Amino acid sequence: MGKVIHPEFLMTTTVMPDTEPEIRKRIDACPKLASLQTNNRALSDLVKSDFSVTSQIAEIIRRDPSLSARLLRMVNSVYFSLSARVNNIEEAVFFLGLRQIRELSMATPVIEELEKLKAATTKPLPWKELWSHSIASAMITREILQATSLSIDDDTDYLVGLLHNVGKVVMANAYPAELEEVSRTRHKTPLDVCAMEQKIIGWDHAQIGAYYLERHQVAEEIVFAVKYHNNPAEAPRHGLFAAAVQVADRLVRHAGISGGFEKIDPIAADSWLKLDAWKILFGDNEEESALAQAHIANALNRLPAMLSGMT
């Protein structure tokens, strides 16, 4: 299983990182998940259909208690500002609309699956903060990519943001002492977090998450976006997805929604405009960049209210 490290040992001793075969062995030993894809096929097919009927969608949602609870919590959140509380699933589906039903149906099973993976840990960690950051990043990644010329006909734009930090969950299972050391250290930037992870483990959370997802046969676009979301310029393919995730991560952190575990200094306003990721997305076109900034700013203003019903 590789080295076993106690936190107090890490504080006083230089520890050599694992070799790549040792890292893979640890990750392979993590619990296998039933699925890291969207919710049941019936709901997925219905919300994508031009002939969807609210009553049919509501009937499928009723079979999933967790999804039903999230649906009602979201529709009764401050985002909708309804005068009366909604307790009927079909009525909630009507108010939410198909796009948000799709996003909710993707986030719920993924979070529940990852809950199984982190269940083996004993150290209390701010899991809700991680889920909030993941869902917020998914929403903003989708908004960023909508401002580009990239044509996306599925939910990859949402899933890359939702899963970009899955490596942290895997670390909690495979490298709990190292994750604790990273989480109690103050970092200036997300890249500093990656540097520390690489120093004490051998891989950072992006590499760990990408390998884990690849083992689960998740689509290459998602695997590459997760692996390169901290250095999108190095992505051999699917660089737009990786770039959008990096920008979304910075925007969400700037909005006060932390990455979950690590302590990172506040993200300065507009610092994401200086990232290589922004240039990958919008090039040197000032007009396109300005339009994208306005579009994203509008989404950020809506984010807290939308998020309050999903986590």
Image (tube, rainbow, N blue to C red):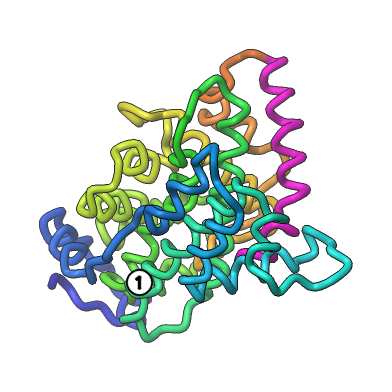
Q: Residue furthest bottom?
A: 122
Is residue 195 positioned above or below 82 on the image?
above
Which amino acid type is marked by label 1? Answer: Ala
Residue drawn where x is 14% and y is 70% of the image: 2
Left/right of residue 287 with respect to residue 276 in the rendered view: right
Which quarter of the figure is the N terminus placed in?
A: bottom left
> Which percent across, then down, holds residue 175?
29, 70
Residue at far right of view: 83
Residue at left offset 37%, top offset 68%: 113
Based on the displayed image, in which of its 4 quarters is residue 54 positioned? bottom right
**Label 1: which secondary element:** helix
Q: Residue at x 34, y 54 (%)?
A: 204
Front residue of this view, candidates 132 and 58: 58
Q: Is residue 108 left or right of residue 268?
A: left
Whether residue 303 is in magenta: the answer is yes
- Above-or-below relation of 174 to 273: below
- In the foreground, 120 or 4: 120
Q: x, y (%) of residue 223?
A: 32, 43
Overall secondary structure of the magenta stretch? helix
**Location of residue 17 in the rendering, given as x and y in whole percent from the top left corner:** 22, 61
Which residue corresponds to mark 1?
Answer: 172
Q: How many marks?
A: 1
Question: Residue at the location (35% across, 71% down)?
Answer: 172
Indicate the quadrant containing the C terminus: top left, top right, bottom left or bottom right.
bottom right
Asked if residue 176 is positioned above or below residue 303 in the image, the reply reads below
**Is residue 156 shown in magenta?**
no
Q: Is residue 178 left or right of residue 293?
A: left
Part of the protein shown in magenta: 286-311
Residue 32 in picture, x, y percent from top left:
22, 67
Which corner quadrant of the image does residue 140 belong to? top right
Q: Residues within 10 Å of mark 1 (few under 14, many from 20)?
A: many
